[in-house]
Amino acid sequence: MWVGSTGAKAAEVVTAAGRSSEQMAEAFRKASKALYDLCDALTSAQSKDGDGREQLRKARTMLGGEDGFFDDMVETDDEEADRKRAQDIAGTGANYLYAAAQEADDAARAAARELNKYAAEARAGHMHTDNMSAADRLVLADVGVFGGPQEENELLTADDLERSGRFMEKMNAQDEARFERMLADAKTPQERAYLVKALAAGYDVDQVGQFRDTIHGKDPYWLQQHLSPIVTAGDSKGDEGLNPDGSNRNTDYQWFGDQKWSQEGNTCVPSSTVTARAMVDPLYALELTGGPSGQENDPDAFRHRLHDEQLRLNEEGDGDYLHWWSDVPDGMDSDGQNEIANDEISPHTGSKYEYQQVRGADERRDVLPDIEKSVAEGKPVPFEVEGHEKDGGRVGHQMMIIGQEGDMLQIYNPWGQTTWVGEDDFVNGHMDKASDSRMPDAYAVHLPADR
Amino acid sequence: MSSALRRLALPALLMTVLAGCGSTGPDTYELGEKHIQVDAGEEFRLSVPVDTATGEWWYLTSPKPDADVVRRTGKQEEIKADDDAVGGGSGTDFFGFTAVGPGTTRIRLIQCPRGACAGGGDAGGPVTPSPVPSGSPTPDKKYRATIHTYTVTVRKP
């Protein structure tokens, strides 16, 4: 049997190549359609813009030239009628210009969304290294997390592939040989991909080696449970209506055994940050799930460690407490939110977070392309929602955008669940679908910015 | 208790007492008060603490109380939280009722931690505990719904 340099078997290569070529064909087809749509929209916008300018020119002509000193002081009935007609025509012209600008803007945003997505999906191409054959890269990019459809649960993100390739290029010959041996000895494609993910998360070959000793030979289910907090079900995007609290009925709960990846008490910010880090850092995930030995399979012990970690991050982000002598967490401000995202997630994705308020629908629409690009690359985007009760009381909450497909966003809520909402829901204040009707409005995001 | 704490506690207690002096409106019964006696025609409320930060909700569930004895008038939620932070605070739900006529009936409130209840909304029907799939272990207590039953006796005025 032919064996690739990292042990990718021929069947894996053929399967991966088949899937990759299908995805590529679809990506080219859809990218082509996106560009044609953009072209059509720009032509239409250009036409509207031309009409608008023509109307404005006509209005300007109707007003005639300046009469001199008395122009503003004397207006005959005819002049008044002309002025009002010109005003109407100018108004129509301005509306055309506005519609043209809006159409061009919307079309550009839609095209950017589609093209960003396909660029990120050409995943094997992100791994620039001579230390691995094209066949091996193809297989790695094709590995899915156990428990859900491969295309919804790619184990290595575009960012993982890019970073691991970069780190491999910097290895000395000895480390390169050790890492190559680990990959070649991996028992499953998932084991191999988690080793690459560990490298991408910023660990050196010694640390990856210790990690490898802990996970070597484990089956794909064990690896998912211990190393990937989130699994996306195949039917997760279907619209099943709403619960009485305004949230989506179609929701996936995320479990380790019989315990959820959810917040304990008022710790939404630390909790969503802990889970986001566990998504990008498999060594950290294993510390939480497998304990000091990495071999435990005890959900209660996991829950205990998860809560300890939520408390640690509340302290790290200078979070609030119930009262001044309490040690019970009670919320966190925007400085703390950004600080713990930068301390915990950024070192493992390579992108610092920048806090940005998005209180208006236009601001939220404007920030969507950046969000889409980040999550397509595999960088979670923390964001805050809020709502106001009739009595004036305010409720605020943090969640994470962790996926994007078409015009939908996948949201992790630290209540231990994931669901999909429309981008229009994000823009128009319907994030209650991912939380509840107490907090429908997204008002701030933490955007990953490339270092 | 240290002397500093005592100094803080006394004004707080006085403020609570003074605030209570001016309060009017229907009688309010806390979570521990499960046996309630009211006069016909009187309005009353059931007050329950709700953990809004973790997505908890409370609903009136089935079987509904005898409509000849009590009638539901509405639900209000009050939330206390810091305006500058997210994730903090807590709430209180008030379920309002009118005592319609003499008799005894039960009011059942269901406390739903996130994901613990089904029904209502687009699914229709009453909100009830989520069914546990056959063969699955019973979920941990913190993930399960709890039904709180109040026995209400309405007296002739």
Image (cartoon, coloured by chain):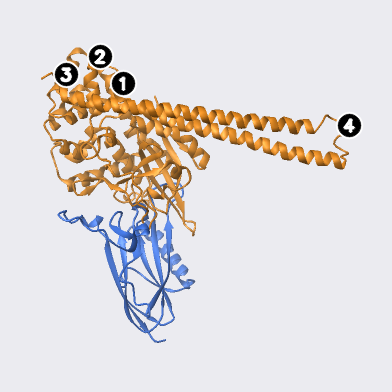
Whether callout 4 and callout 1 share a subunit is answered yes
Q: Which chain is blue?
A: B
N-terminal-most mark, 1 or 2 = 1
N-terminal-most mark, 2 or 4 = 4
Whether callout 3 and callout 2 share a subunit is answered yes
- Please, what secondary structure does the residue beneath circle 2 have? loop
Comparing A327 with A93, the one in front is A93
Q: Position of residue A69 (x, y in %)?
A: 88, 31
Q: In the rendered view, does A132 fall on the left or right side of A83?
A: left
N-terminal-most mark, 4 or 1 = 4
Is the residue B143 above or below the residue A104 in the image?
below
Image mark 3: chain:
A
Q: Position of residue A167 (x, y in %)?
A: 27, 20
Pointer 4: residues within 10 angstroms few (<14), some, or many (20+)? few
Q: Where is residue A85 in the image (x, y as percent from the top left)?
A: 76, 40
N-terminal-most mark, 3 or 2 = 3
N-terminal-most mark, 3 or 1 = 3
Residue at mark 3 to residue at mark 4: CA–CA distance? 88 Å
Instruction: Check residue A69 in the rendering and tell me which mark sits there, or answer none.
Output: 4
